[in-house]
Image: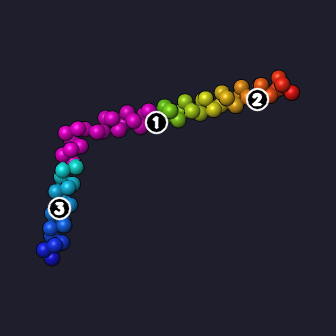
Amino acid sequence: AGHMRSVKNNNVGLETDVNSALQVHDLRGPMLRAKDMVKFAAGLNEKLSASTSIYTAKLEETTS
């Protein structure tokens, strides 16, 4: 029982340390910006892929 209590106390302490670190360095803003950057990159990739497909199709038409 003593070991379980010690493990539980250690976990609570670790949770407190992690929460404190997140508050001090506030990672929420950078995480939101990172998500926006990933969405932007995915959209850009789709546009570039579509553009490349159209260009390749036109190139094949002219060489046929």
Name the N-terminal-most of marks 1 and 2: 1
- Of mark 2 and mark 3, the one earlier in the sequence is 3
Looking at the image, residue 52 sits to the left or right of residue 39; the answer is right
Circle 1 crowding by C-alpha within 10 Å: few under 14, some 14–19, many from 20: few
Side (left or right) of 1 relative to 47: left
Measured Cα–Cα span from mark 2 to mark 3: 62 Å
Residue ranking furthest to the top: 62
Quadrant location of the C terminus?
A: top right
The amino acid beneath tag 1 is: Val
Characterize the local packing of mark 3: few (<14), some (14-19) or many (20 or more) Cα atoms within 10 angstroms: few
Q: Residue tagged by mark 3?
A: 10
Q: Are marks 2 and 3 in contact (CB under 8 Å)?
A: no
Name the residue at 18% across, 59% down. Answer: 12
Q: Which residues are magenta?
A: 19-37
Q: Residue 30, percent across and down?
A: 33, 35
- Residue 2 placement: quadrant: bottom left
Q: Secondary structure at mark 1?
A: helix
Work out which residue is located at the far bottom of the displayed protein and give it: 1
Kind of element beneath mark 3: helix
Kind of residue at disc 3: Asn
Q: Which residue is mark 1?
A: 38
What residue is at 71 percent from the left and 28 percent from the top?
54
State the quadrant of the N terminus.
bottom left
